[in-house]
Amino acid sequence: MKDHDERVTERSAADRAVYIISVAAELAGVHPQTLRIYEQKGLVRPYRTSGNTRRYSEADIARLRRVQLLTQDGVNLEGVKRIMAMEEDLQRMRARIAQLEARLQERPIPMPGSRTGMAIVPLASVFAPPWPGGRA
């Protein structure tokens, strides 16, 4: 299992923008003009240097390859954008669920009826409807 420092280093390396547009296009298997279109459509956001040239990272290349797979399967660019947004949302939600599950493991919630002074009682004994007669 990799430790935290190794994962951070790998993530940093994947995010380092080092490829110029022609190299990125070749690695992704597309024409450089296609990369410009993908950028216009918001599918990829390459880093811009002080001279305003595009630089792509390994993460950008992976994203471009995912775009290519989806378009080859017949998905249009707007559909690709939506699919990728949903995949990112799902990834964030899974990470959040994992965080919450870890917190629950650290501090379990007491169950009613256990030795916490809580008891299971019928709902009608603690709740009276506001209408006359108290029954539906």
Image (cartoon, helix red, strand yellow):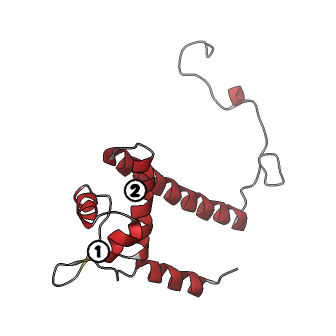
- Residue type of the residue flagged with mark 2: Val
Is 74 drawn above or below residue 66 in the view shown?
A: above
Q: Which mark is residue 22?
A: 1
Q: In the picture, residue 110 is in which quadrant?
A: bottom right
Q: Secondary structure at mark 1?
A: helix
Q: In the rendering, at what x and y percent does residue 133 appear? A: 60, 12
Residue drawn at x 35%, y 51% as measured from the top left: 81
Q: Please tell me how crowded label 1 is: few (under 14), some (14-19), or many (20+) other residues with Cα within 10 Å.
A: some
| 53 in relation to 126, above or below | below
Q: Quadrant of residue 108?
A: bottom right
Looking at the image, the residue that sits furthest to the left is: 51
- Give the x, y percent position of residue 131: 53, 16
Q: Earlier in the sequence, mark 2 or mark 1?
A: 1
Q: Is residue 101 above or below residue 56?
A: above
Name the residue furthest right: 115
Q: Residue at x 61, y 25 (%)?
A: 128
Residue receiving disc 2? 67
The C terminus sits in image quarter: top right
Residue at 48% in and 53% down: 87
Residue 55 left/right relative to 97: left
